[in-house]
Image (cartoon, rainbow, N blue to C red):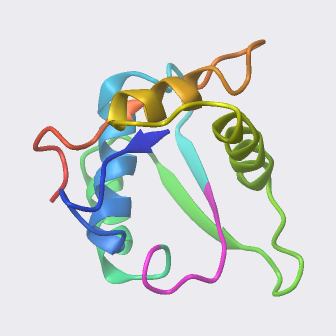
C-alpha cells in the first residue's frame, strides 16, 4: 500500500505512476517474471492516462519487463481483490484511533493479521 496525505500530493496519474515505480524499486515484488499484468478500473484520471503509459514504455525499454498488459474490468463488474483489501482496511480503521499519519499506516499494516500489508511512505520526496 502506498500512502501519503493530500497535503503532499494529489491522486492523479503522476502519483499512480510514482507508486508503481517505487513499489518495483523497493523490492516488494521479489519476482523474476518478465511479464507485468496491470488490472485497472476505468478511472481515466488515475489509471488510463499517458503517465502510466510512459512508465510502461520506460520499464520495457530499461529491460525491467518484456511485456506489460493493462487490462480493464467490465463496467459494472469491477469488484477486484484490491476492493476486498480496502474493505478490510476500512473495517480496521473504524475500530482504531486515527490521529496522525502513523496511526493510519499502522491500521493498514494490521488490517490483515495473517499477512500484514506492506506500507510504502510516498510522502518523502518519492512522488513526481
Residue 125, given in percent of the width and then of the height, sits at: 10, 44
The answer to if 45 sits in the magenta stretch is yes
Could you tell me how many numbered marks the image carries?
0
Q: Residue furthest top?
A: 114
Asked if residue 108 is positioned above or below residue 73 in the image, the reply reads above
Position of the C terminus, as image quadrant, is bottom left
In front here: 25 or 109? 109
- Tell me where residue 114 sits by quadrant: top right
* Image coords of residue 68 (percent x, y): 52, 58
Using the image, determine if residue 1 lies above or below residue 70: above
Q: Residue furthest right?
A: 77
Residue at 48% in and 36% down = 98
**Magenta-tinted stretch:** 38-46
Q: Is residue 121 magenta?
A: no
Q: Residue at x 81, y 87 (%)?
A: 75
Magenta highlight: main SS: loop
Compared with residue 99, is residue 114 higher up or lower down, i.e. above or below? above
> In percent of the image, x 51 and y 55: which residue is there?
67
Q: Residue at x 46, y 48 (%)?
A: 66
Q: Position of residue 40 (x, y in %)?
A: 63, 68
Residue 94, image x, y percentages: 69, 41
Quick check: 74 left or right of 36? right
Amino acid at each position: 500500500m502506498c500512502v501519503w496525505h493530500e497535503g503532499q500530493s494529489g491522486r492523479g496519474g503522476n502519483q499512480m505512476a510514482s507508486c508503481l515505480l517505487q513499489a518495483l524499486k523497493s523490492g516488494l515484488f521479489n519476482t523474476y517474471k518478465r511479464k507485468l499484468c496491470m488490472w485497472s478500473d476505468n478511472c481515466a484520471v488515475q489509471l488510463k492516462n499517458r503517465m502510466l503509459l510512459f512508465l510502461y514504455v520506460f520499464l520495457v525499454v530499461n529491460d525491467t519487463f518484456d511485456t506489460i498488459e493493462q487490462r480493464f474490468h467490465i463496467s459494472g463488474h469491477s469488484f477486484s481483490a484490491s476492493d476486498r483489501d480496502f474493505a478490510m482496511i476500512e473495517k480496521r480503521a473504524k475500530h482504531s484511533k486515527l490521529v496522525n499519519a502513523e496511526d493510519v499506516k499502522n491500521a493498514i499494516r494490521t488490517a490483515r493479521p495473517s499477512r500484514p500489508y506492506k506500507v510504502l511512505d510516498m510522502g518523502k520526496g518519492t512522488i513526481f
